[in-house]
Image (cartoon, grey):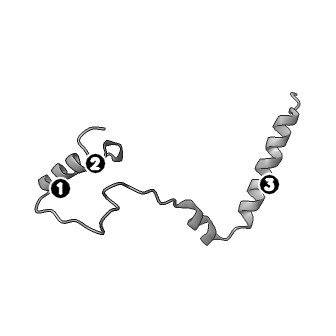
Amino acid sequence: MKRASSKGKKQLHEWIAEFESARKRSFSQHINNSFIHTYKPVLDDTPYRTFRSMKEYRKWCEKKLPKWLGYGKTL
């Protein structure tokens, strides 16, 4: 049987401490901590937009949104 190194033991104690800390949090705290708002350029700049057709919407996405958001034809 292999013995745990001091580094491994330290990491195990850290994980246990984190688990115990998380276990004491309420459900609402877990939910609140689970969602992180990420600013999405252009999309978050106005409350809403309207388009006459899906084709118009897709054209707008392709032209206005950064590729990394994934709304274009290809990434």
53 vs 26, nearest the viewer: 53
Residue 62 % position (x, y): 21, 46
Q: Which mark is residue 71?
A: 2
Q: Is residue 2 left or right of residue 30?
A: right
Residue at image location 60% in from the left, 71% down from the top: 28
User: Three-letter amino acid code at disc 1?
Assistant: Tyr
Q: Is residue 34 left or right of residue 43?
A: right
Q: Are marks 1 and 3 in contact (CB under 8 Å)?
A: no
Residue 37 % position (x, y): 47, 60
Callout count: 3
Mark 3 residue element: helix
* Residue labelled with disc 3: 17
Residue at image location 13% in from the left, 55% down from the top: 56
3 vs 29, nearest the viewer: 29
Residue at image location 80% in from the left, 44% down from the top: 12
Residue 50 % position (x, y): 18, 66
Sequence-earlier tag: 1 or 3: 3
Mark 2 residue element: loop
Residue at image location 59% in from the left, 63% down from the top: 33
Sequence-earlier tag: 1 or 2: 1
Location of the N terminus by quadrant is top right
Looking at the image, is 42 positioned above or below residue 4? Answer: below
Q: Is residue 38 left or right of residue 72?
A: right
Q: CA distance from mark 1 to mark 2?
A: 10 Å
Q: Which mark is residue 57?
A: 1
